[in-house]
Amino acid sequence: MDRNMNDNLYHVLYEIEMYLEAPSPNIEYRTTVNNVFWECRLIHLRNLIDFFSGASKDDDIKLSDIKIPMKEDNNLLCSRNHPAYKAINKAVCHLTKSRYSRSKNCPNLNDYFDEAGNIRHDSIDAFYKELIMPKIEEFLEKVLKEPKYSHHHERVNKLKDIIKKPHELFNYNGVTSTAAPDTVSIVELHNPESH
């Protein structure tokens, strides 16, 4: 097998694993620890959106590099123009004023940042959960059907098990809930006694 294809798949599985396994913030953790958890999830979500949408740059791994029968997702490609995607970029990829100048400069981001400039993770998760999870599941199924990737099958099955169990992907303030709060603020998660 082409070593590049194998390496490419390894990296995509890593992105999926990091997105699924990023711990959820917990009120018992310091603010900086919770920020690390949120930023980890958002960075890997952003990478998966680009991968599954075909919006990757020339030197990025593309879905076509994996050589499985799966096409880029137009809904995910369109979602790159959505305020949720822009909020991810603003939250983790840029030092930006738009977090704090909500209605003046970037009114379309108001649903994704609270008054204090904290990203509203519940809004981002809600928007992308229905778009990204089916793509991840489809991708894992296609990889399992490829004999050339049989040495990755154990890892793929572990990822599928993570998806099946009630994991903490949408766990807010240390409590797993199907109904996320309107806003999860890093300030709210701050525990002064942990300093």
Image: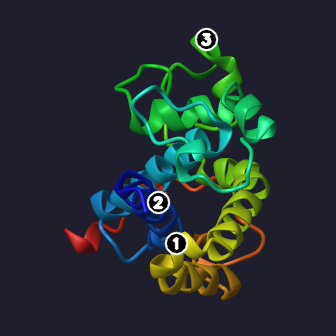
- Residue hosting label 1: 149
Quick check: can you spot residue 96? yes
Seen as rendered, the residue at the extreme top is 105
In the depicted structure, whether residue 164 falls above or below residue 131: below
Query: Local crowd at mark 2 within 10 Å, few (<14), some, or many (≥20)?
Result: many
Taking the spot 67% from the left edge, 62% from the top edge, the residue there is 139
Taking the spot 57% from the left edge, 33% from the top edge, the residue there is 87
Q: Nearest the camera: 48 or 147?
A: 147
Viewer-nearest of discs 2 and 3: 2
* Label 2–label 1 contact, CB within 8 A: yes
Q: Nearest the camera: 142 or 32?
A: 142
- Residue hosting label 3: 104
Taking the spot 67% from the left edge, 38% from the top edge, the residue there is 53
Query: Quarter holding the C terminus?
Result: bottom left
Query: Quarter holding the N terminus?
Result: bottom left
Query: Local crowd at mark 3 within 10 Å, few (<14), some, or many (≥20)?
Result: few
Q: Nearest the camera: 61 or 48?
A: 61
**Residue 9 tag number:** 2
Secondary element at image label 2: helix
**Amino acid type at image mark 2:** Leu
Viewer-nearest of discs 3 and 1: 1
Seen as rendered, the residue at the extreme front is 1
Residue 131 percent location from the top left of the image? 76, 51
Residue 182 percent location from the top left of the image? 71, 54
**Amino acid type at image mark 1:** Tyr
